[in-house]
Image (spheres, rainbow, N blue to C red):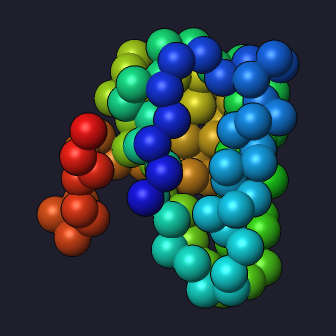
Amino acid sequence: MLTLQGEIDLSTAPGVSARLDAATARPGTELVVDLRAVTFMDCSGLSVLCRARERLLRGGGSVRLVVNDSAVLRLLRLTGLSQVFDTITELPQAVPVPVG
């Protein structure tokens, strides 16, 4: 599981991309990206998520986005990515919640 927070935009996308690259390095990874604490996302953020998704799919893995913020959900819907990404509103029970 990877938890992202704050703004994901042109200035923060490189750092987010590096974290996603590390999380998707192994083939067959089933990644859950928790976006519930994301307060803003622009096309740079969408781009890094799409890149991670493609990398996972090529390696036989998958990605699910945990998102319950109306602005982020709206962005996914407006761009058509809500049909591409598997989105859920709560963490799956099988994923341990990080402490701290």
State which quarter of the image contains the N terminus: bottom left
**Could you tell whether 52 is left or right of 3 in the image?**
right
Closer to us: 87 or 1: 1
Residue at 49% x, 26% y is 5
> Residue 28 appears at what percent x and percent y?
60, 86
* Above or below, 24 relative to 11: below
Left or right position of 38 against 14: left
State how many labels appear. 0
Q: Residue at x 21, y 70 (%)?
A: 94
Q: Quadrant of residue 68?
A: top left
Could you say where residue 82 lies in the image, as x and y percent from the top left? 55, 41
Is residue 50 visible in the rendered image? The answer is no
Up-down relation of residue 57 to residue 66 (above or below): below
Q: Quadrant of the C terminus?
A: top left
Residue 53 higher or lower than 89, as above or below: below
| Whether residue 37 can be seen here | yes
Rendered location of residue 36, percent (x, y): 37, 30
Q: Residue furthest front?
A: 100
Report the front residue among 63 and 98.
98
Residue at image coords 40%, 17%: 70
Q: Residue at x 62, y 53 (%)?
A: 84
Is 85 placed left or right of 49 in the picture?
left
